[in-house]
């Protein structure tokens, strides 16, 4: 099931998927605002990342009351999935580095999305693994943050949450989260819009004005 959904969603861009989610009135169109591609290249290239989420909640290292996972959080990566790591806000250290990407690549993960900072860009790029994050840092997580909970729902912003097994789609334009309950509707809407857009592009290439092309094919 997961591989089938991945292949079907991979036909579309994050923009296509966000447009469908906006039409479905999903919060923020599923857009993970502020998250950008850092590997294999910085906001460039054809590489796409698609897969169900494995979520990781980080806490401040000083938080001794929060739960601790049974093993290192990088070992929870799974083949075909995307790890979503949420770092406490305002930390200037990274919570994902080259060693973690090495482990993720070995386990067959599709990539990682970090709501926070990463480091060791050269190592991620050498592994050719998709890494999306808010920013970078030269500081590691040691003494700053640690993993706490695995595969729990995580709030990104307002009503926008990432749940385990929701799909994350990342490319040069950004990252969108697709809730499991809307996957089939999103795919259907993207397929329909792709046919329409093909006609719009064709009309524009043939000299139609934007107004004419949109009025003829999108309305």
Image (cartoon, helix red, strand yellow):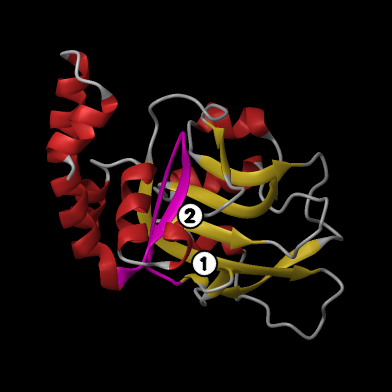
Residue stretch rendered in magenta on the structure: 163-180
Checking the image for residue 128, the label placed there is none
Q: Position of residue 68 (x, y in %)?
A: 68, 78
Q: Position of residue 71 (x, y in %)?
A: 60, 69
Checking the image for residue 31, the label placed there is 2
Which image quarter is the N terminus in?
bottom left
The quarter of the displayed image where residue 97 is located: top right
Assign a secondary structure to mark 1.
strand
Q: Position of residue 109 (x, y in %)?
A: 42, 50
- Which of these two is toward me, 196 or 57? 196
Name the side, left or right, on which 109 lies relative to 20: right
Query: Is 207 rendered above or below residue 219?
Result: above
The quarter of the displayed image where residue 62 is located: bottom right
Assign a secondary structure to mark 2.
loop
Q: Earlier in the sequence, mark 2 or mark 1?
A: 2
Question: On the image, numbered disc 1 is attached to which residue?
Answer: 55
Is 167 part of what is drawn in magenta? Answer: yes
């Amino acid at each position: 099931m997961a591989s089938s959904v991945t292949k079907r969603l991979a036909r579309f861009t994050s923009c296509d998927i966000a447009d469908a989610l906006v039409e479905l009135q999903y919060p923020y169109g599923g857009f993970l605002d502020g998250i950008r591609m850092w590997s294999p290249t910085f906001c460039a290239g054809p590489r796409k990342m698609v897969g169900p989420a494995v979520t990781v909640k980080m806490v401040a290292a000083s938080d001794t009351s929060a739960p601790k996972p049974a093993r290192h959080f990088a070992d929870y990566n799974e083949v075909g999935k995307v790890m979503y790591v949420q770092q406490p806000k305002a930390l200037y250290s990274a919570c994902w580095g080259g060693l973690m990407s090495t482990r993720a690549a070995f386990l067959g993960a599709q990539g990682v999305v970090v709501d926070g900072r990463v480091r060791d860009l050269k190592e991620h790029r050498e592994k050719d693994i998709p890494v999306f994050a808010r920013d970078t840092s030269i500081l590691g997580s040691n003494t700053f943050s640690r993993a706490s909970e695995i595969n729990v729902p995580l709030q990104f912003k307002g009503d926008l949450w990432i749940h385990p097994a929701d799909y994350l789609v990342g490319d040069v334009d950004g990252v969108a989260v697709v809730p499991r309950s809307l996957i089939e509707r999103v795919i259907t809407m993207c397929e329909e819009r792709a046919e329409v857009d093909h006609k719009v592009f064709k009309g524009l290439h043939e000299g139609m004005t934007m107004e004419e092309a949109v009025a003829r094919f999108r309305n």
